[in-house]
Amino acid sequence: MLYDPEACGQSAQIAAPGTKPFNKRISRQWYDDRFGTTRMDLNLSPPEIQFRDELRAWLEQNLPRNWKQEHAALGAMEEKFAYLRRWQKKLYEGGWVGVAWPKDYGGRGASLIEQVILIEEMARASAPPVANVLGVGLVGPTLIAYGDDAQKKRFLAKILSGEEIWCQGFSEPNAGSDLAALGSEARRDGDHFILDGHKVWNSYGWAADWCAMLVRTDPQAPKHKGLTYLLVDMHSPGVRVRPLRQMTGESEFSELFFQNVRVPAENVLGRVNDGWNVAISTLMHERNTLGANLHIVFKRQFDRIVELARANGKAADPLVRQKLARCRADIEVFRLTQMRAITRVNQSGVPGPEGSILKIFWSEFNQRFQQVASEILGPYAQLTGECEHSPDEGQWAYGFLRARGNTIEAGTSEVQRNIVAQFVLGLPKSY
Amino acid sequence: MRFDLSETQQLLKNTARKFLQAECPMAEVRRLMETETAHDPVLWSKIAAQGWTGIVFPEEYDGLGLGMVELAATMEEMGRALMPGPYLATVPMAGVLLDAAASAAQKRKYLAPICRGEARAAVFEGGLFAQDLGVADYLIQADRRNGALELVLWPASAVAAKPMPALDLTRRLYEVAITNPAAGELLARGSEAQAALDHMYDVATTALVAEMLGGMQRVLEITVEYAKTRKQFGKPIGQFQAVQHLCADMVLLVETTRSAAYYAAYALQEKLPEAREAVSIAKSYASEAYREVGNRGIQIHGGMGFTWENDLHLYYRRAKASEILFGDATEHRERIARLVLGG
Ligand SMILES: Cc1cc2nc3c(=O)[nH]c(=O)nc-3n(C[C@H](O)[C@H](O)[C@H](O)COP(=O)(O)OP(=O)(O)OC[C@H]3O[C@@H](n4cnc5c(N)ncnc54)[C@H](O)[C@@H]3O)c2cc1C
């Protein structure tokens, strides 16, 4: 029952103060009867609280107290990574990785909200990250959505335990934003595919045992229709990994070369030539779930820069106060918008193009935020980790540079705006 | 955890939208803005019959006894329709102040008629103007006297209201002069008065932000519609990326404002400790967002966007007035800074 013409405006004249009330005015009883009595509720439900408390108790028992020092003391990138792998193993044994995955595949069948609680609790406890970030966050959910039983049995548990590390091989030197233009090719040869190609910007490529790839299997078909999603063993003959040095100086990502690599046909995820749809599912997960802990990361950095601004007197400068207050508001607005998005995905089951709005927001916010932080630090902002005067071991100089990658990785801001225009607003495609 | 309007609240909002489409279409807004007060007694009696004039007030004073989120959802629709008249001044401002500060006898005398749609009121706390005083039956003044804050109620007969021409044609501003200093009635004094006033500003600011959200949403819809139909160079202008990206920014601004607005309403409703910060976050954010949405909407309309007959400037005028009311972005950011940084 909606707008009730009878209940509104029966009497067109207004009565003078003190005269008897309208008899046709809506009463609370009328309202409750027609509209119901449900209310917005941001509280955790009892099962969600139980989940959180169980996790907190586990962390209390198992979180290495001074893991940051332990981790920092390890020299090489490989040793550091091995440390995170051990941590992931421990989490897995406790049942705290991939909690929203089905029970049959090593998860708990938890709700998306519970998964987000886990991500937030981990961030709050400053727990180490898992090693297999892309496996758990992107490849696993795509496997659950598109994999056959044999594939799920073969891959999922080892993703959760960190026994097999995954990277994602989508981008190519000539196919970035225009991902569907990619040229890496897999030709059918009996019960195998023969793969030749070149991938680039592969985060964790240097550590990966497996690569989730998008390759061309039908060069004659229109560009979106000839692609296949292939799971490739990085230890196969013909695979070569070359580290790529980033502007930050690290080698977080790599370049991958594939020459005559034999991939069993059972490693096709989804259907042959339907890889675009499978890949879109991965990209939506990338935009929706990879950001779930970010508001806590931002908040922690914010609290720290506030501390530093107090210490150096800048907290009293009205301009700095304006800038910090805007950052505070942006972090909160981001957290809240994410909560609304999670509520929606929890109900519909699938991430939608709205994830692009979040991606644009947080990536552009972080660039503004790092700039504000460096203004507060003044000349100290440029000191990198090796310098004894450097605040927070060079975190801010690093953060300033690293933030430039945010509006490029996982789809550039321009491409995200195209997506919002076309898929959220229904404007005609521009290309 | 479910951060969304509930079914009940969504139903209320849908109903409000239908009501306003039928009773307050754009032609009616334009008719009213040309009148002396922008207030229509017939429309007022209809919204009273919907229960809106008593929406957040106790049933014992003829209110509906609903909460902040319901108020916000309703005001969002009023903002979308650009509903003219003294609702903001009467309900989230004067009504909330009466509810928080007045005695039971005073509430029966002054709040109950507001709930029933029989009276309108305005609030004045020094400053430049009182909104919609010209159609108010009484004025509540927040005044510092003898070293303490006092909330005093004046009947319309004791107040002179002089209209001030201003940007927003749908809500009028008036200079205030008390003409009969003996006619005032004290509602509250000292810390009690201060607490009531603070509470009123939290509620009214949140209600205003919700209303701004509705306006932004409408500007976005009008603009996207135009971008799909207006053709240049043989295609809809919405096919040009420069236009698409402006539209995408507008969606982003609307959706993020929605998060901030709903959360401020929820935080006030649940009396969360961070409620005051949430209100300032919402107002600082919406103050800039509504203007930015308006800027882009007008730009995308080209010359049409600059005409009187196009509706966008009516929203843009409301955006500017709303930005200023209860403190602009800079002022609310300083409040956030005080909470976060001290000083
Ligand atoms: C830190 C980091 C980690 C990454 N990790 C991975 C990974 O693990 N796996 C992986 O596969 N990839 C990864 N990438 C690659 C990333 O997805 C691509 O860099 C990105 O999609 C952009 O592609 P491109 O670099 O080829 O730039 P291009 O597509 O060449 O874009 C160049 C410029 O043109 C603009 N542009 C392009 N097309 C359009 C258009 N249609 N409309 C408007 N503007 C347009 C872009 O926005 C950009 O500004 C990573 C990148 C970074 C920075």
Image: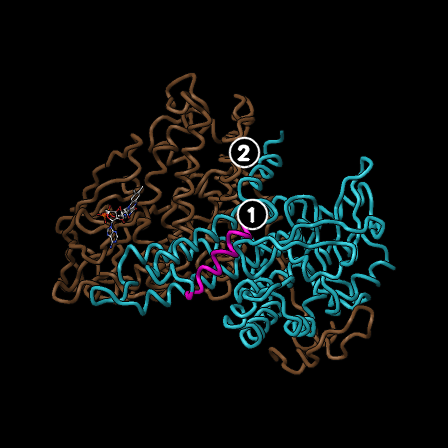
Chain colours: A brown, B cyan
Instruction: Name which residue type carries label 2.
Output: Asp
Badge 2: chain ID? A
Task: Check if mark 2's residue and mark 1's residue have beta carbons within 8 Å.
Answer: no
Badge 1: chain ID? B
Kindly identify the residue that appears in the image at 21 percent across and 38 percent down.
A242
Q: Is residue B253 above or below residue B230?
A: above
Q: Is residue A34 left or right of residue A280?
A: right
* Label 2 and label 1 in one chain: no
Q: Which residues are magenta?
A: B309-323
For the residue labelled by badge 1, is the local secondary structure a helix, a strand or a loop? helix
Within 10 Å of disc 1 (Cα), the crowding (few <14, some 14-19, many 20+) is: few
Query: Disc count in the image?
Result: 2
User: Label 1 CB, ligand 1: below 8 Å?
Assistant: no
Q: Which residue is mark 1?
A: B324
Place of residue B13 in the rendered image (x, y in percent of width and height, measured from the top left):
58, 69
Q: Nearer the viewer, residue B175 or A376?
A: B175
Q: Which residue is mark 2?
A: A303
Q: Residue furthest bottom?
A: A6
* Magenta part, dominant SS: helix
Q: Nearer the viewer, residue B292 or A298?
A: B292
